Amino acid sequence: MPQLLLELFSEEIPARMQAQAARDLERMMRDGLSAAGLISEGMKAYAGPRRLALVVEGLPLAQADRDEELKGPRVGSPDQAVEGFLRKTGLSREQLVERDGLWFGRIHSAGRPTPEIIAELVEQTVRGFPWPKSMTWGHGRLRWVRPLSRILCVFDRQVVPVSFEGLVAADLSQGHRFMGSGLAFRARDFDEYREALAGHFVVLDVEERKQRIVEGARTLCFARNLELVEDEGLLDEVAGLAEWPTPVLGDMDPQFLDLPPEVIRTSMRTHQKYFAVRDPATGKLAPHFITVANIAAADGGRLIAAGNAKVLSSRLSDARFFWAEDRKAGFEPWLEKLSGVTFHARLGTMAQRVERIAVLARKIAPLVGADPDMAEMAARLAKADLSSQMVGEFPELQGVMGRYYALADGKDPAVAEAIRDHYRPQGPGDAVPASPLSATVALADKLDTLTGFFAIDEKPTGSKDPYALRRAALGVIRIVVDGQRRLSLTPVLQAAGDQAESLLPFFADRLKVALRDQGKRFDLVDAVFALKDDDLVRIVARVDALDTFLKTWDGANLLAGYRRAVNILKAEEKKGPLPTGTPAFVSEPIEEAALFAALQTLSPQLDAALAAEDFTGAMSALAGLRAPVDAFFTAVLVNSPVASERENRLMLLRQVRDGMGRVADFALVTG
Amino acid sequence: MTGTPPNSFQNLILTLHQYWSEQGCVILQPHDLEVGAGTLHPATVLRALGPKAWNAAYVQPSRRPGDGRYGENPNRLQHYYQYQVLLKPNPPNMQDLYLGSLEAIGLDPRQHDIRFVEDDWENPTVGAWGLGWEVWCDGMEVSQYTYMQQVGGLDVYPVAGELTYGLERLAMYVFGVDSVYDLPFNDPSAPGGGLTYGDVFLENERQMSAYNFEIADVETLKRQFADMELQVPLILAGKGPQGQALVLPAYDHVLKASHLFNVMNARGAIAVAERASYIGRIRDLCKLCASAWLEQQERAA
């Protein structure tokens, strides 16, 4: 079956945009092709520094022909109506068919050749491509991420007539900017293309580029008895910066090893995009680095390594200067500077924010088991390093540097740790702050953010969450739940400001999402939330127990019994108010007596289990209801003609419903 | 052009002049006012606008009062040189032309690792932005390469390609020197011995740093800034012999205001909250000039 090969060749595409661009290209082409009725057997898109490419396998040579029947006017309609229909369909009167008193016209449309459709689709895709940022160049009006200079487009080994904005597709591409001949080459299908690229020093597939980098880097390290510090994010980035990625090992002046390792790694990573290496024996950073060059130089990269080493030295010299200056500066002047830094136009300065966090930390401390004075002090110092020169240069070292400077300044190590850890957790893979002190400051920091932005009505909407409030709320949830910190959320939110009412449901939503991500059923979370508890640890424990219970035979059957009870109660409620009061013991039927007895035992069991927050125990207590409820429904007619019997039985069912309702709102369990 | 790679700072400049001259650029001299970057030369900011083709290259002394270090930091200067190239419209082979200039100064892209790394350029004081890259040579940024999309808030059409080389940094790399002050300024084998960059500029760094950080009189600067700001619309309202708005002198006054702001900033006289407002005021002035210039250019075309 025929194959389509498309390449859009441009100047260097930003590394961070490449992966999404490949996905967008694939999606737009797939949607366009299938809208035209062209279904492929498979497609794959590629992105690299200078090209987006797409191969589509198994496309038909043309669209299928289409036969359509169009309904026309009623037989006997005025001539104008019939004429109109003929004009519209291009048919003659003889071609119309009469059926059920109506005229019908059959239209046969021949399918268009696939290349025609591809040509239109390529133009449409290029013009509508969703680059995060795009530009025009020269005299052109076309927008692309950087100048687009060449289109290769072949279908079934023939060039597709794509032509717009001065770009004319051909069967030509070109290879590496510096290595190889630099001449254009011809490719009529994907195998030729891929092979020619490799011969012209271009690795097309990003996964292969990554593999080349990692393997090359490991080999270099191995030869020197070093170990590569792996870094996925950096790997993704450098794989988008080189068509012929070639790791080179360089040396760093060992005197810089007295800098904090985070500083060295950040300088290497953010400024230079180098991988760090460590000594496998000690696990400490070794005085070397790996850079990923775009060429395999004739001298084996000696010049490249030397040049990069020099650049790193001057970067680290700067860092050392900041490190020395910052340790001399001290916290007081930094804190003063924060009053000149706007946090948000409507939420005041950083200094005002620090003040709020300090006050809040003091209130939260006792709930988390931290010392209020220490918490307040740690909170006051937590943002000071934002004024330091090092953090000015490397914003991602906020907190980390604060800890170092606090230690250098002789502050309590627990305070220093809280300064570093109050930003945690910074992502799903990051741990929550361990100590109560750190947790206190972290909670105060996040709750101040949430309260502030909710107060100025900057709540997240849809995919927009510019202030990362969802992440802040999830951070609070994780600090509380992962750290098993027992507190009631409402008073804490009230301490942070006047947004508790709108923040509570926001937290409920975030918790639901978090639990769902852990594989917990959404409806179970709802069932527990309905109890209006705001102790997150307890909520999660309840959901866990409920989840386990409903997976048991007793649980599933009791749920069925519960529903039956509720349905009966609802139906009876429509006839008139349900009887109130407690049911009485009757000796007959025996099933009614048994249910009565079971409910009598359930109540104290539930009291005890819930008081002890033993939700598994509460579930087992409920499990004891399963057999009597089943037997009751099998043997006893609730809607007895004898009014007193009916009333007693309804009261029993009501007790079943309400008793179970103490553990969760089973009505909300849908699964 | 073939030739031996430059052996001094001034030779590096001459090599670039020679190279870009051969590509058809007018080789201009620096604008004779204090500016913070080569972009601010009217040969870039104003000439980027309008329909006319314009290819120019020049050195521009750039003043960054806040970056002064009294001559004590080997990498930072309050006065340094930028080499600026503006090609309007950008030719399709502009990247190749640029790489040719690196080869001319001795950076062989088959020996050195040259990379185009995303960097979207923006200059808020002149309301300008574009997309492009920082160009890396063995991990060091040697140039800024931009397809200018807007200047003074106005679309640049046809698009102009802008190249900015940080000359000292580039020279330090080419000559393998760790301190800017050790750069050979002229041919080291010149009769009587060559001079270093330090021989020429160290004293300048010391005196200017002291002035910028300690001596500059804030009240005077503020007054002068206000004067310049008032002048711009007045000058623009004046008419030249052909009835045209006086954009060029007005723009010079914007540059003066901009430099006064930079000195005040270095002097620590501008609170963080005020900064944005000053930048906004300069941008507004710049926009006035840009609009007037564009109108003139379009009328002329």
Image: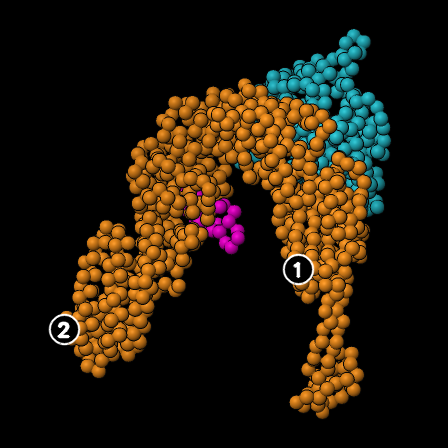
Chain colours: A orange, B cyan
In the picture, the quarter occupied by the C terminus of chain A is: bottom left
> Which residue is disc 1 drawn over?
A41
User: Which one is in front, B215 or B96?
Assistant: B96
> Which residue is disc 2 drawn over?
A587
Q: Which residues are magenta?
A: A448-468
Three-letter residue code for mark 1: Glu
Q: For the view shown, which residue lies furthest in the top direction?
A: B192
Residue at image position (73%, 38%) is A201
In front of the other: label 1 or label 2? Answer: 1
User: Visible in this render: residue A226?
Assistant: yes
Residue at image position (76%, 33%) is B99
The x and y percentages for residue A369 are 30, 38
The x and y percentages for residue A376 are 35, 34
Q: Are marks 1 and 2 on the same chain?
A: yes
Q: Is residue B77 left or right of residue A366?
A: right
Dot 2: within a 10 Å radius of its alpha carbon, few (fewer than 14), some, or many (20 or more) residues? few
Q: Is residue B10 left or right of residue A411?
A: right
Dot 1: within a 10 Å radius of its alpha carbon, few (fewer than 14), some, or many (20 or more) residues? few
